[in-house]
Amino acid sequence: MEEPGLLGRYGLWMIGLGFVFLVLLSTLMDADLRCAQYFYNAGMPQRWFLKTAAPWSWLNQYGEYPVWLLAAGAAVVWCGSLYRRAWLRHRRACALILLAVALGPGLLVNGILKPLWGRPRPHQVESFGGTRPYRYWWQPGNLGGGRSFSSGHAATGYVLVVGAYVVTQRRRRLVLGGALLYGSLVGLARIVTGAHFVSDVLWSGSLMCFTVATLQAVLPAPWSVDSAQGCAPAEGSVYDRAPLGPA
């Protein structure tokens, strides 16, 4: 099996740190309020004037669907591996996908941060016609005070970086770049509609990179009963690290 390069070993950790750097930079530039102001006009009937415009409305409504379909497919293949020996080689990849979706957008963001952090959304703060005071991302609010931190939609988009660990090294950069682009577009759709601040989206990107990288590091490589018959992962793939048995 081809040894993973620098990107395969440390890529997501570095990208996650890059997101943290962007959070700090955007904080210094007061990007949360400044960016939100570009998409808000108090004099218009619909103050967040791009809320119903394409493609932002589509991404808001359907942006999470590809991830749910991917997770459903991974669940089908994992369950199928209990009955089809040829699918055993895909079991770890499926587990990685399912755990990334469940623990990232599911538990960490939507289950813990959003309900407990209490940060008001842009459309809820006084600066944009709401009734609640603005809070920086590091200032937790009251329970039920808002679900802005961090972005669940963006986290669902960014969790697709898990694909970098289930494809060959030749395709890894393409998959990783596509996942980051898609997550950013979904996050931008939440910003232009007044649902999230820039820092909410950036933190979701960072958290998903760290979550997926951690899972990749700690998930054990399964012992395939077919390994003795030469059943091996695709060349260059790093999702299944079990050694090949004798042919």
Image (cartoon, rainbow, N blue to C red):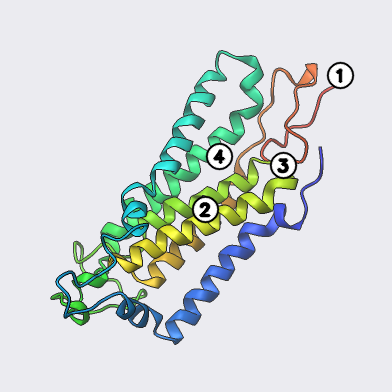
Q: Nearer the viewer, mark 1 or mark 3?
A: 3
Identity, as a three-letter code, of the amino acid under mark 3: Thr
Task: Give residue 247's mark.
Answer: 1
Q: The residue tagged with tag 4: helix, strand or loop?
A: helix
Above or below, 3 against 122 in this view is above
User: What residue is disc 2 on?
Assistant: 211
Q: Of label 1 and label 3, which has the lower sequence position?
A: 3
Q: Of label 4 and label 3, which has the lower sequence position?
A: 4
Q: Where is the C terminus found, in terms of image quarters?
A: top right
Q: The residue tagged with tag 1: helix, strand or loop?
A: loop
Residue at point 39%, 42% (across, down): 65
Residue at point 57%, 20% (across, down): 81
User: What residue is disc 3 on?
Assistant: 168
Identity, as a three-letter code, of the amino acid under mark 2: Thr
Would you call the spot at circle 1 few (<14 residues within 10 Å), some (14-19), or many (20 or more)? Answer: few
Q: Where is the N terminus found, in terms of image quarters?
A: top right
Task: Give residue 96's mark.
Answer: 4
State the CA–CA distance, disc 4 to disc 3. Answer: 16 Å
Above or below, 213 against 43 in this view is above
Q: Of label 2 and label 3, which has the lower sequence position?
A: 3
State the CA–CA distance, disc 1 to disc 2. Answer: 36 Å
Q: Note whether residue 141 is visible.
A: no
State the CA–CA distance, disc 1 to disc 3. Answer: 22 Å
Q: The residue tagged with tag 2: helix, strand or loop?
A: helix
Residue at point 13%, 76% (across, down): 131
Give how far across and how far down residue 29 sits, in percent. Answer: 44, 86
Give how far across and how far down residue 221 sits, in percent. Answer: 67, 35
Question: In which quadrant of the rendered view does residue 223 lie?
Answer: top right
Give how far across and how far down residue 49 sits, in percent. Answer: 25, 70
